[in-house]
Amino acid sequence: MLAVGSAVVVFQGTVRTVQMMGRCGESPRRLKRMACCVNHAAADGAAHDAEGTDLMSSLEPYRDKWREVPGGDDVDSRVFSDDLIDLPDDQFLARWDALAARRAAGVVGRMDPLYRDFFKGRRVIELGGGLGFDGMRFGAQGAHWTFADIVPGNLRVIRRAAALKGIAVETHLIGDDLSFDTLPANYDAIFVIGSIHHVPFDIARKEALNALSRLKVGGRWIELVYPQERWLREGSMPFDTWGTRTDGERTPWVEWHDVEKVRRRLHPAILKTVLDCELASHNFRWIDLEYAGMGRTIDLTKFIDLVGLPVVLDGGRREGWAFTGPKGAFHPIGRVDLRALLSTLSAPFTIELILRITEGTLGVGLVDTDNQYLADTEVVLESTPDIRFVTLRCTEAPAFLVSRNRHENRNSAFVVRSARLLKA
């Protein structure tokens, strides 16, 4: 069923060549977008935006922008921290409380019941705390909160609000070295609410790994991100311009993320998914990962291309690497036998797929010799005009990589653009 399809993708070290051989009628813009997305799928720890933008060596452009933060919920107007800090105490607190109430009533506030008891009595670092609305709520309920931010003015606002409200907090100014070495290595959680996706992936990866060094084994990495669905819906803009649409005209950068991109950012951390769900009509995605320590370091440029493995059709039709599956919620489409390939390799494994699903609902997953799905290895995907990325993870060797239709009353149709197996 699955092997490299009508695209040839060549990865040499970092992505040096991406040759996308689309079907007839595919626009240059779509092929360019596919190349951009493939760059992100090349899990070598680096990311490249659609235009190949060079990474900035200083955080100054981001500091200048993020003096301006959402004034409460994401849909509210924005506030400069410098404009708050000079207000008299009564005006300052009244303004801060009004903004905090808006924040608590919004999207992030919905998640409070899941975390207030977990955070109580525990130590938490918040990366990019803004004006402190989220952490202060949890701090008032007994959490030991450290606000980490790149903007000194934001931290001044937080310290003043905390003092006026009688809440004990700590702050950490993130410098250009992105270091967290002055903080103890005993934190129970790292809370990242729509912040570090606002810098290029390489910068975010360095910051994230430095922060992760402060997290206990068994601790949690909790993050709100902008998902790929939103990026596609809003025009698949280059990351250095998309932010002007999501967060205002002064925004220098924003990238979409999903759970696999967060995992790549934190590689080689061993992470167990606790929660991975969309919020607010796919405007946001909430990701909660349990940290189990650092795993083996893998050369992610080395992989086994699944090209050439036999394709067994269990149902439907195949033309090249384009497949159609008959309607029926669990109707099988095809499979690839992985047993001989994996017999000499040690688990865990990942299989990375790039698909274009043009009709219906598709399930792709991993099964054993009895055709039973390995735990949490099937991904169900709806059709979309753009390509989709799938990463299947397993801690034991699967027998087959399989696909099946997942809609009772609709056929499915999809093209496999890339399939590769890697150690995890």
Image (cartoon, rainbow, N blue to C red):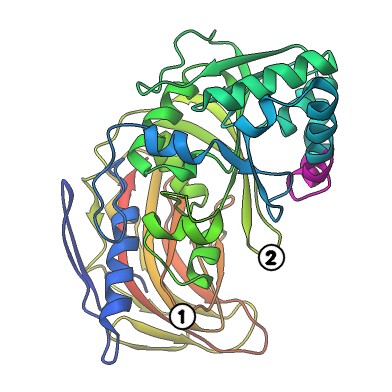
Residue 44: percent from left, percent from top: 27, 43
Identify the secondary structure beneath mark 2. loop
Tell me what residue is drawn at x 77 percent, y 43 percent: 103
The residue that appears at 28% across and 75% down in the rendered structure is 31
Q: In which quarter of the image is residue 218?
A: top right
Along the horizontal axis of the image, is 134 left or right of 252? right
Numbered range of the magenta stretch:
101-111
* x, y percent for residue 34: 32, 69
Q: Quadrant of the C terminus?
A: top left
Residue designated by label 1: 385
Instruction: State if disc 2 and disc 1 touch (CB < 8 Å).
Output: no
Residue 144 x, y percent position in the rendering: 72, 15
| Left or right of 120 on screen, residue 402 | left
Q: Which amino acid does label 2 sit on?
A: Ser
Tag 1: Cα neighbours inside 10 Å, few (<14), some, or many (≥20)? few
| Residue to which mark 2 is pinned | 281
Whether 359 is drawn above or below 380: the answer is below
Q: Please tell me how crowded label 2 is: few (under 14), some (14-19), or many (20+) other residues with Cα within 10 Å.
A: few
* Secondary structure of the residue carrying numbered label 1: loop
